[in-house]
Amino acid sequence: MSNTRQVILETLSQRGSLPIDELARATRHSAMATRYHLALLIEEGLVAADQVDHQANVGRPQVLYALADRAHEHLPKQYTWLAEQLLEEIGDSLGAKEKRALLRRAGKRIAAAAPVLRRGARVESRLDRAADFLSERGYMARWEETDEEFALHICNCPYRQVALQHREVCDMDMAMIGALVDSPLKMTGCIANKEGRCSFIVAPNERRVKN
C-alpha cells in the first residue's frame, strides 16, 4: 500500500469521518490526487463514502469518508509485543515448567479444531489433514516420504519474532502437530534456530501397505 493511502487510513482512524479537503491537507496532496487514492481505497473495501446534506441545504451534498471494518487490518499492530508481554507474565506467575505445560495444552486445544478422521486412519491421511490445517493458519506446511520415513515441513512460522525470544512456544507447535498426526514426532530443524524451516520426522503407527 502506498504511503499516501496509509496516511488516509491513519487519519480517518484518528479523526473519524472527514471531507476531501481535510484529507487532502493531511496527505499534503491536491484534492484531485487525494480523490484518486480514495477511489482505490473504496474499491478495496477499506473506505466508505457517505453523502451528508449541508445544514442549510445549500449547494451540493458533502461527501464524508470513513474507515470500513476491513481497514483496521492495515493499521499499525503490536501483536508481537503483546504476545511477549503475556508470555513473560505467565512465566512470572506460573513458573517456566507450568508455562510450557500450558502452551502444550493450548497446542492440543488448537489441534482439536481440525476435521475428525475415521478411527485408524493411515498416516498419509493424518499428514494431509495436518498440512491442510497448518497451511490454512499460515504455516505453509507440506509432507514427504523418504527412506521409509515421513517428514512434515513447515516453511513459515506465523510468530517467528516471538519464537526467537520465547522458544517455549515451539512446545505449543510440537503438541499441536503431534495431535494432528496422532504420532510421535522428532524435530530435525527449527526456524527459531534461524534455519530455513521447521522439520519433523513422523513415526507412523502402522507400516504403509504397498500396492
Image (cartoon, rainbow, N blue to C red):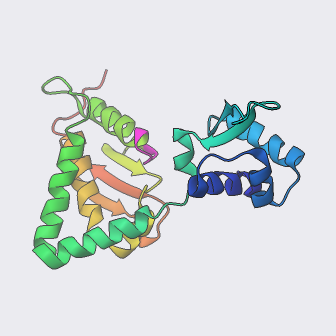
- Image location of residue 30, percent across then percent down: 89, 52
Up-down relation of residue 189 to residue 49 (above or below): below
Q: Which residues are magenta?
A: 136-141
Quick check: is 139 in the magenta stretch? yes
Residue nearest the observer in this picture, 12 or 43: 12
* 121 to 130, vertically: above or below: above
What main secondary structure does the magenta stretch of the protein show?
Answer: loop
Name the quadrant containing residue 150. Answer: top left
- Residue in view at x 40 percent, y 72 percent: 164
**Observer-nearest residue: 144 or 176?**
176
Q: Left or right: 77 with respect to 152?
A: right
Q: Is residue 200 magenta?
A: no
Q: Is residue 135 left or right of residue 28?
A: left
Residue drawn at x 18%, y 48% as measured from the top left: 108
User: Looking at the picture, how far across and down is residue 47, in whole percent?
Assistant: 64, 39
Q: Which residue is found at the position 36% from the left and 47% from the top?
A: 152
| Residue 203 in view | no
**Residue in the foreground of this view, choosing between 70 and 177:** 70
Seen at 68% across and 47% down, the residue is 18
Tally of numbered discs: 0
Q: Left or right? Give the position of 126 relative to 20.
A: left
Q: Nearer the viewer, residue 87 or 50?
A: 50
Residue 193 in the image: x percent, y percent?
A: 41, 71
> Does residue 108 appear in this view?
yes
Quarter holding residue 15: bottom right
Q: Is residue 112 left or right of residue 32?
A: left
Image quarter hosting the C terminus? top left
Picture coordinates of residue 142, whole percent (x, y): 43, 42
